[in-house]
């Protein structure tokens, strides 16, 4: 009797699921490094092992605002049950991440799909340090209902090779805040309302101007696109990102991907971005 019920319910259940599963933001993640990565994505995706040249696609629903992160993990080893550890980006010792975990020296992309006013917000951040060069770019959807967007942050430079000795970490480079735990680097306490760049954050900024280098960095590096846009997360991205062949159904990103939006767009989205950054900070469990 119960198996009969299951049989009847299964097709209905699938019909209900299918449109939802395809009606979201696709994030195409690719490993262009010469070594194996274990990319992670939370709250949707978890994590996988990705060989050089391989793709991993996740689908973030845009029916409700969804905030999350994508990042790379390096030098991992997991057993058959998916338990183990990584040198960078570890999320509590599991292959399929459910939390951000403690991630010193790990660069992350942060996103909110279907945020305030049906806008997606996204950035890349060096606030937890650096491990693997990364781009996080919208995939233009030209001609599709006016949606689509061409600008996003890139950090294609290998900061590890220029990391000051005080910040060096296995497999990467720490942010000064996590090493020195001082207000001036963390924008806390006496620096919470008046916080500027430091010599350490400036080194990050010089190499990766699109990425957050200290907590109160210029909020114009939070990018926005209309909800409905798809995204590309590329680790060790090629310099000419538009030469990267995406999986079927996706168009290559614009060659001018790092260009800032027009000044009037910045002005009216600046405050939204600031509000959003505040919210993102509360999501991190560090
Ligand atoms: C970055 O530089 C470090 C140190 O020089 C090196 O070990 C690492 O493989 C480099 N990473 C990439 C992606 O080139
Ligand atoms: C940054 O400034 C501190 C304090 O003045 C100094 O100890 C440190 O060596 C400097 N670091 C770099 C990378 O210049
Ligand atoms: C980048 O790649 C695209 C696509 O292959 C090509 O059309 C374009 O000319 C390239 N740009 C540069 C600056 O090499
Ligand atoms: C891309 O940038 C170049 C140089 O700044 C500019 O000449 C060109 O018009 C831009 N193309 C687009 C599509 O914005």
Image (cartoon, rainbow, N blue to C red):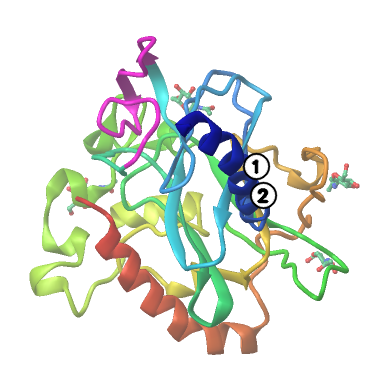
Q: Which residue is mark 1?
A: 11
Q: Nearer the viewer, residue 74 or 164?
A: 74
Vertical arrangement, residue 272 with respect to residue 2, above or below: below
Q: Tag 2's secondary structure?
A: helix
Q: Residue at x 55, y 53 (%)?
A: 60
Residue 284 spot, x, y in % from top left: 27, 55
Point 68% across, 55% down: residue:
19
The region drawn magenta spans 77-98
Residue 118, by quadrant, is: bottom right
- Give the residue at x 8% y 70%: 189
- Residue 268 visible in the snapshot: yes
Q: Is residue 224 above or below residue 164?
A: below
Instruction: Tell me the tag on residue 258.
Output: none
Query: Is residue 282 toward the left or the right of residue 80 in the image?
Result: left
Looking at the rendered image, the disc whose residue lies closer to the viewer, 1 or 2, is 1
Q: Main secondary structure of the magenta part?
A: loop
Residue located farthest toward the top when viewing the structure as drawn: 80
C-alpha span from label 1 to label 2: 6 Å
């Amino acid at each position: 009797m119960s198996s009969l019920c299951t049989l009847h319910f299964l097709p209905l259940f699938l019909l209900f699921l299918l449109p939802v599963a395809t009606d979201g933001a696709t994030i195409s993640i690719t490993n262009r490094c010469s070594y194996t990565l274990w990319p992670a994505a939370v709250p949707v995706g978890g994590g996988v092992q990705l060989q050089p040249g391989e793709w991993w696609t996740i689908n973030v629903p845009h029916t409700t605002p969804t905030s999350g992160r994508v990042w790379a993990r390096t030098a991992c080893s997991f057993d058959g049950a998916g338990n183990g550890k990584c040198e960078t980006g570890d999320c509590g010792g599991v292959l399929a991440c459910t939390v951000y975990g403690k991630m010193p020296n790990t660069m992350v992309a942060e996103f909110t799909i279907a945020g305030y006013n049906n806008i997606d917000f996204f950035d890349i951040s060096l606030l937890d340090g650096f491990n693997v060069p990364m781009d996080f770019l919208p995939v233009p959807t030209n001609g599709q209902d006016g949606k689509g967007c061409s600008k996003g942050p890139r950090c294609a430079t290998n900061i590890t090779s220029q990391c000051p000795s005080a910040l060096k970490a296995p497999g990467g480079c720490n942010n000064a805040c996590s090493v020195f735990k001082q207000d001036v680097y963390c924008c806390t306490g006496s620096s919470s309302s008046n916080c500027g760049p430091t010599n350490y954050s400036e080194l990050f900024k010089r190499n990766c101007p699109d990425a957050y280098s200290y907590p109160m960095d210029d909020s114009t590096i939070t990018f926005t696109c209309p909800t409905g846009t798809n995204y590309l997360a590329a680790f060790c991205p090629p310099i000419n990102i538009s030469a990267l062949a995406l999986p079927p159904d996706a168009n290559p990103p614009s060659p001018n991907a790092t260009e800032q939006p027009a000044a009037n767009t910045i002005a009216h989205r600046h405050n939204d971005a600031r509000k959003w950054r505040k919210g993102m900070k509360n999501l991190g469990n560090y």
